[in-house]
Amino acid sequence: MTEPASILEVRGLSKRYLGLTAVDNLSFEVEAGAVVGMIGPNGSGKSTTIDCISGFQPADGGQWFLDGHEMTGLPPHRIARAGLTRTFQAVRAYDELTLLENLCVAVQENDGVGWLQALGRGSRLRRSEAAAEVRGRDLLATVGLADYTDAPAAILSYGQRKLLTIAASMMARPKLVVLDEPVAGVNPTMIRHIEQVIHKLNAEGVTLVLIEHNIDFIMSLCRRVIVLESGCKIADGPPGLIRSDPHVIAAYLGQTRAAELDQRRV
Ligand SMILES: Nc1ncnc2c1ncn2[C@@H]1O[C@H](COP(=O)(O)OP(=O)(O)OP(=O)(O)O)[C@@H](O)[C@H]1O
Ligand SMILES: [Mg+2]
């Protein structure tokens, strides 16, 4: 069992792909109500970490707990139902469905049911859909997409699609959400908007882990940042310490450019 203050505890997580160790005996905790950043160079194991703890990839070792309950080895829908959801680095949306339908489908997926299967379920689906519809409309308002409720997802801009996936991750009323690169490739105005959405969700009591390469975004939202390199945690602390940590600087740009980076204060 985990300490009551930690909503997520990961102990000794390992994941190998053939000869490659993507996550190497990684342990960390996330305190309830926090917004925690997770950064690290390309290929350092950030997405693999969340793939494992959300049940989308089998781990090779380790245990993880949500709110004191062991989640190790459970499938994604069981973990989602327990209160941990995530977005994917590559935006996933059903272009031909409306935004509201996309959110209703997210509920079915969290129940472990594919959308085609779900659409064939008849009246039981209609009842659960009525509740999902209310929640979906609410969330579309929260993320600022209410005007597009009945429009097909195909018409959304890239940044708006990111917002839709954040809304989808919130459908199951999770305790903890991991957003995998929520602002990658998004323009500065939309980044500020997504930042406000994250503040709003956190103020409503949701704990968030943000995986990002945008350091300014992470540093402005998070009081604590975990840094990975080659599947290992190399730093864990407040932004001020992370910025000046020589291991972090070296991991990002290599020893030879460390001084230059320090001057630029990324
Ligand atoms: N499905 C897979 N099969 C084989 N190797 C994989 C798979 N997924 C990830 N890897 C490898 O595991 C390592 C960690 O990848 P991961 O995607 O977790 O990194 P990341 O920190 O999320 O990187 P990025 O910032 O580029 O998204 C990489 O070397 C990657 O090539
Ligand atoms: Mg990744």
Image (spheres, rainbow, N blue to C red):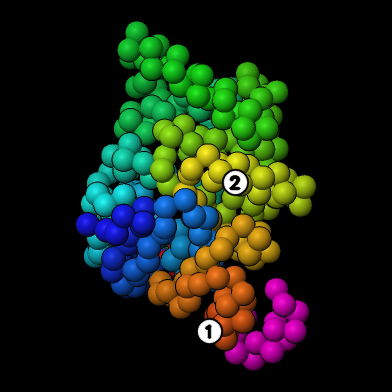
Pointer 1 residue: 247
Q: Quick one: SS at disc 2?
A: helix
The reply to whether callout 1 and callout 2 are in contact (CB within 8 Å) is: no
In the rendered view, tell whether residue 246 sits above or below residue 239: below
Residue 10 position by quadrant: bottom left
**Which tag, 1 or 2, sits closer to the chain's start?**
2
Within 10 Å of disc 1 (Cα), the crowding (few <14, some 14-19, many 20+) is some
Label of residue 198 in the image: 2
Horizontal and vertical percent for residue 27? 34, 68
Residue 57 makes an appearance in the image:
no
- What range is drawn magenta here? 252-266
Q: Quick one: SS at disc 1?
A: helix
Mark 1, ligand 1, within 8 Å: the answer is no
In the rendered view, tell whether residue 166 sits above or below residue 126: below
Write the residue at 68% across / 53% down. Answer: 185
Mark whose residue sits in front, 1 or 2:
2
Nearest the viewer among 155 and 105 is: 105
Residue 266 position by quadrant: bottom right
Q: CA distance from mark 1 to mark 2?
A: 29 Å
Tag 1: amino acid: His
Tag 2: amino acid: Ile
